[in-house]
Amino acid sequence: MVKNPVNNNELYFGKHSEIPMNEEQKAYMKMAVDLSRSGMESGKGGPFGCVIVKDGKVIGIGSNSVLETNDPTAHAEIVAIRDACRNLGHFQLDGCEVYTSCEPCPMCLGAIYWARPSKVFFANDKRDAAEAGFDDDFIYQELELPYEKRKIPFEQGMQDTAKEVFQEWILKEDKTLY
């Protein structure tokens, strides 16, 4: 174990078990890693890249663009999902594979599940990200806490009023489910 110099957490330092990838998959992953480097070097954001593929064709790409856009949600996976969905003309990634230079953070993981790709491949894992100063573990810990004990307090109000809109959605006959 080694200490992360950024936050002094103990981290595993070493190679993790990997599933073998075929040459085509390696090429897509290399594209994601190359995007992570080019985005970082150009000052767009952190060292993260993502490529989305459908039927052997790249349909979406993204690199972390948080600094360039001043948008904390502009992570590589989110940028790539937006690009892929725009190119497909659909809000889901059925039959797609996601290649990302790092295991997705909690926000990106949620977006991936909403987009519903067939599979996700990643290079670095969350421990590698933490070693580089991108430690998302606190978010997972926060989710387990009661609202009032979170670092950013959450307070619920007007649930009855908001629930009326959910009831309207439930009864809406022309809705598109997703």
Image: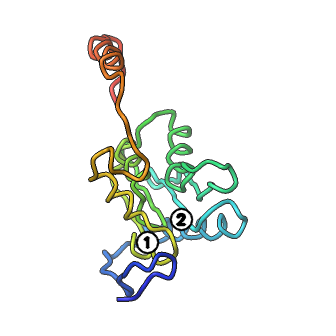
- Image quarter in which the N terminus is found: bottom left
Callout 1 crowding tier (Cα within 10 Å): few <14, some 14–19, many ≥20: some
Q: Quadrant of the C terminus?
A: top left
Q: Residue at x 33, y 76 (%)?
A: 20
Residue 40 placement (x, y as % from top left): 65, 67
- Number of marks in the image? 2
Instruction: Specify few, some or many for label 2: CA neighbours under 10 Å numbering under 14, 14-19, or 20 or more.
Output: many
Residue that carries the numbered disc 1 in the rendered image: 123
| Residue located at (38% from left, 62% from top) | 138
Looking at the image, residue 65 sits to the left or right of residue 59; the answer is right
Q: Write down the quadrant of residue 176 in the picture.
A: top left
Distance from the alpha carbon under mark 1 to that under mark 2: 9 Å
Please name the amino acid that badge 1 sits on: Ala
In the image, residue 170 lies at what x, y percent? 27, 16
Say which of 38 and 28 sits in front: 38
Query: Residue flagged by tag 2: what amino acid is it?
Result: Ala
The residue sitting at 45% across, 81% down in the picture is 4
Element type where label 2 sits in the image: helix
Q: Which sits earlier in the primary sequence, circle 1 or circle 2? A: 2
Q: Residue 101: where, in percent of width, then height?
A: 49, 67
Query: Residue 9: which numbered mark, if any?
Result: none
Name the residue at 44% across, 76% down. 128
Q: Which residue is mark 2?
A: 32
Q: Are marks 1 and 2 in contact (CB under 8 Å)?
A: yes
Mark 1 element type: strand
Residue 132 is left or right of residue 20, and the answer is right
Task: Give the vertical position of 123 relative to 140 (above or below).
Answer: below
How far from the left and from the top, in percent, is residue 32? 53, 65
